[in-house]
Image (spheres, helix red, strand yellow):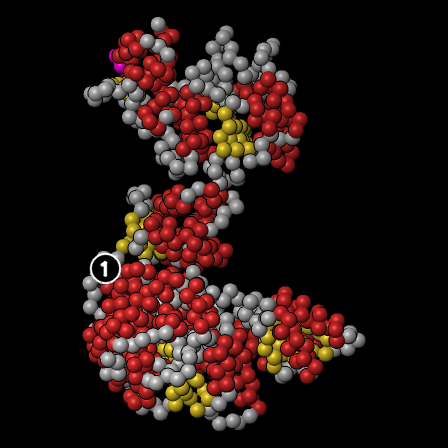
Amino acid sequence: MEHNQDVVYDAVRELIYTDGNYTEGVTTDVVAEHTQLQRTNTSALLNKLVRLGKLKKTKTRPVRYQMDEGTPTTDAFSTLIGASGSLKKAIQLAKAAVLYPSGNLNIQITAQPGSGTSAMVERITQFAEASQIINTKAPHIVVNCRNYAENIHSLDPVLFGPKGDYKGSCFEQARNGILFINHYEYLQASQQSEIIDLLDRKAGAFDPIVADDKTGTKTPFMIFSCSNQANQQLERKLPVTIKLPAVDERPLNEKLALINHFFVGEAKTSQRKIIVSTTVVKALLLADYFHNVKDIMAAVTIACAKAYVRVVNEPGCDINVYLDDLKPVTQKALLKEKENRPVLDALFEDSETMIFTPETAVVTRDEKKPGLDLYGDINKQYALLVDQGVGSKNIKHVISDHIKKLFERYNYNHRYDLTNSQEQLAKIVKPEIITTVKTWLDNCSKVLHRTFEPSVFYGLCLHINSLLTINITRQRMSSEQAKKLIDQYPAEYKESVKLAQILNDNLQLNLSPEETALLMMFLIDSKDETPKGHPVVLYIMHGNGAAKSLSETTNTLNQNNYAYGYDMNLDVSTTTAMGEIKALIKKIDQGEGVIVIYDMGSIKVMIDTISQETNIKLRTIQLPITLIGIDAARKSSMETDIDYVYHLVTTDAKNMFATDQKKEEIIVTLCHTGEGGAAQLKDYIDQNSRLGMRVKALAMSDKQELTNEIIALRKIYQIHAFVGVYDPQLFGIPYIPISKVFENSKKNLDQILSFKPLTGNNFAYDQIYNYFREQFKFTSIAKLQQLMPDIMDQLVTTYDLGEDQRIGLFVHLGSLVERTLAGNPPTVEARTATLISKYPDDYKFLRRTLKPLEKHFKLIISDDEIATVLMIVRKL
């Protein structure tokens, strides 16, 4: 009966610890079935175990039996990250090995380096002690074979005893306890073979792994660990094999829990609060780790150490971890954010930062409260898209959608009232068209599960109005083009047919299938891929060494590697040279083309031939001057559009050698046909603008045709800007969305066309941009022109700045970007901590407002720089 009592106790313990169905306890029927004992006997034994204090029973019906309070209520494995996920099977195997009725089973653990083997062994030990399988004072012997890698046979006395008879060996020392042999893959074949022989032995004069009744010693509980390339012979001798997953095999929520755990540890070590941007955590989450968990811990520790240095002399100051604190290879992991966005959205929701405190292991999140920070949310979304490498065209689509969601969440009254915008539009578009388009577009959003940006609404209104008011004689889309689009976008065409029917019923406008397909084009999202590289420069010179010397000089002076050289030996045939040049161009092209700087006309023929054969964008400059190459390589490192770089370089080159008069500036309006909406937009600008610029209406349905027309126009005019429903992104020409034109009063039209903030009427930007072009080496002026007006608009709106202050602040911010990109140390402001403490709201506002500069130019603006800006706007 005593034996049956132990059988029942072991059964209860095994079921509760190894089967997830019985964590709340087991019934008499379950135990009886498991032990194959009669139910009445089982019930009597269970109640006896309760009286002995080994078990307890619940007051529920049916009664469940649980482990007594004397046994720790917290499972040793429960605090392991992934205990109920990726490690669940491993934990069940470990528990089964420990609780095996006839004695614990030896275990083999296989895992990649740094996957948590030591942590697993530690929990197995704790569980064995808590389950009273091993006494808490029993020996726990650890042998790390990797420590003996340089002389592996020096481990023999430890493994086999000083005399080779196992007396005094680790096996003997571990009797009654646990022996953990780690990294046994480092052992040589002869050593592994001897261990296998030991495991095979059944009896002998002295056997360290067999129980000794005379001395009362028990067989040691043995755990062997190795890399995934385990010894199969040894594996067959070990009853239980546990495979631990690598970090990349674990779900992102477990990886996030590991990251949080290490940040909490750093907070406790530093005894300071650690505030981490969710962008940083995402980068850590998506990065690859060769040494698994150990590499995650190292990445977190290094980032915290870098951040700690900034506040080491400020006791009590929080540690703020930024993206720049991570290694570049970890930062690049954000490129994988797009493909993991659904999981990341679920993990982070609307959190901007994560806060780790030394007092508690609980991670808190800094979530935005409704109605408090609309612009902060927009900037956050924009920054995330930039980090993902999303192009500016696609960003406008996503941001427009995001803003509408924010309006719904915040119930925010935007300063551009929709009614006022429609009043502006109603001056040139029939009101019934506006109503019809708005109703239909709202329905499209529901059917297509897509939110359309304001430019789609305005563009459609202008287009339909043109169909009613302008006599268009030529067919604007061929039947073949229309059929191709209809086949490619059936859902969008179905909705366009509905609109065509509404226009026919309400406005007696009968549209052909081709014209209906034109309506569909407003609904089609841009599918252009974001450029993946930059243009590069190739010198081709006759002779020996000239081209390669120029490329080396260019790369040294620019501190980059965007220039290459090919020396055209005079003895080499033209056919051979062209083949070598062609191979080199294919090799160096990053997908955005090559600017070739050459010395003789015959090379131009080769390049034109190679361009036709490879379809690589090649641009040629017959000016073998070092300054031209240096300028081209520098601009290529900052821009992705080869035609924009080529335009800038050739323009500067012409200015070197000629005194041509400045070209007349024109504005290009765009719509899908060039005749309807673009023509009316042209008329609107002609009637209301006082800039005196010529306006040209063009179509954008055919990208190549539009490109050719723009190239032809640029020979005569300086194109000031595109205005239309989306940005064609040609030659770096600035873009103004049509929505911005109609969401403002016509009296503000010239400021919009001049890229000036609406609140800064007297603030002239052009001279400053020209100054920047002359002085700056590392900063893209085109990017500044896109970003600075909105930033200055927010600053001028918030702070009462005079004209001199605005100009000074504008120049300061541009210089800040150039200085940071050049790698110069930030300006040190002695009062930084005091200013931030005194003006916390201003500090947060400036951080948010200047975030676009950080994201677009890939830089970090220091607190010292923020403090300087704070002093300017606060007039301190």
Image position of 396 (left or right of 407): right
Assess whether residue 57 is covered by the magenta stretch.
Answer: no
Residue 686 placement: quadrant: bottom left
Q: Position of residue 501 (x, y in %)?
A: 29, 70
Which quadrant, please, contains the N terminus?
Answer: top left
Picture residue at 32% right of the left edge, 65% below the top:
495
Q: Nearer the viewer, residue 384 or 125?
A: 384
The percent position of residue 703, horizontal first and vertical second, equals 47, 75
Q: Could you tell me which quadrant the C terminus lies in?
A: bottom left
Bin the neighbour count of mark 1 within 10 Å (Cα to Cα): few under 14, some 14-19, many 20 and up.
few
Circle 1 sits in a helix, a strand or a loop, which is it? helix
302 sits to left or right of 164: left
**Pick the front one: 202 or 673:** 673
- Say if 550 sits above or below 46 in the image: below
**Quarter of the image holding residue 339?**
bottom left
User: What type is the residue that disc 1 sits on?
Assistant: Arg
Task: Residue 716: give x, y in percent of width and height.
Answer: 48, 90
Q: Which residues are magenta?
A: 48-53
Whole-percent x, y for residue 373 in the image: 25, 63
The residue drawn where x is 48% and y is 94% is 661
Residue at the spot 52% in from the left edge and 20% down from the top edge: 173
Question: What residue lies at 30% left-to-right and 84% top-to-bottom?
Answer: 469
Mark 1 sits on what residue?
A: 409
The part of the image, by quadrant, that contains residue 718 is bottom left
